[in-house]
Image: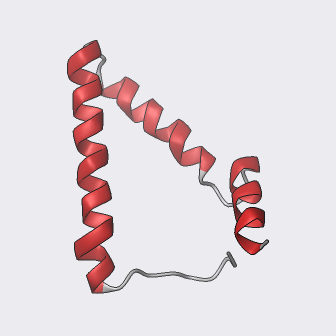
Amino acid sequence: MENKKWAPSQEENLGAITHVYESIIEELSELQKETGCPDSFIYDFIGKIQYEWHPESCLSIVRNKKIKN
């Protein structure tokens, strides 16, 4: 995927993106409920996931090479 400015359509925002957002929030809430971890742990946890999607991370580079092939 090229590094162009991408913006979702209104349909994507109201559909798939909202669904995934709500699912992530629900899963993180469940994780917190099950483990009793503080918000700071959830914040750091999300940061680790976020790093994996940084355009210059190894995982992102590999993922994008697979998409192109």
Question: In the image, is residue 17 above or below residue 44?
Answer: below
Q: Position of residue 68 (x, y in %)?
A: 75, 74
Residue at (51% x, 81% y) in the render = 6
Q: Position of residue 31 (x, y in %)?
A: 29, 25
Residue at (25% x, 72% y) in the render = 15
Displayed quadrant of residue 25: top left
Q: Position of residue 46 (x, y in %)?
A: 44, 39
Question: In the image, is residue 22 above or below residue 40?
Answer: below
Query: 69 or 19: which is nearer to us?
Result: 69
In this figure, which colouring scheme has been used for the structure?
Answer: secondary structure
Q: Which quadrant, please, contains the C terminus?
A: bottom right
The tally of labels here is 0
Residue at (36% x, 26% y) in the render = 40
Looking at this rendering, what residue extends furthest in the front direction? 69
Q: Which quadrant, please, contains the N terminus?
A: bottom right
Residue at (69% x, 79% y) in the render = 2
Question: In the image, is residue 27 above or below residue 67?
Answer: above
Query: 50 or 15: which is nearer to us?
Result: 15
Displayed quadrant of residue 38: top left
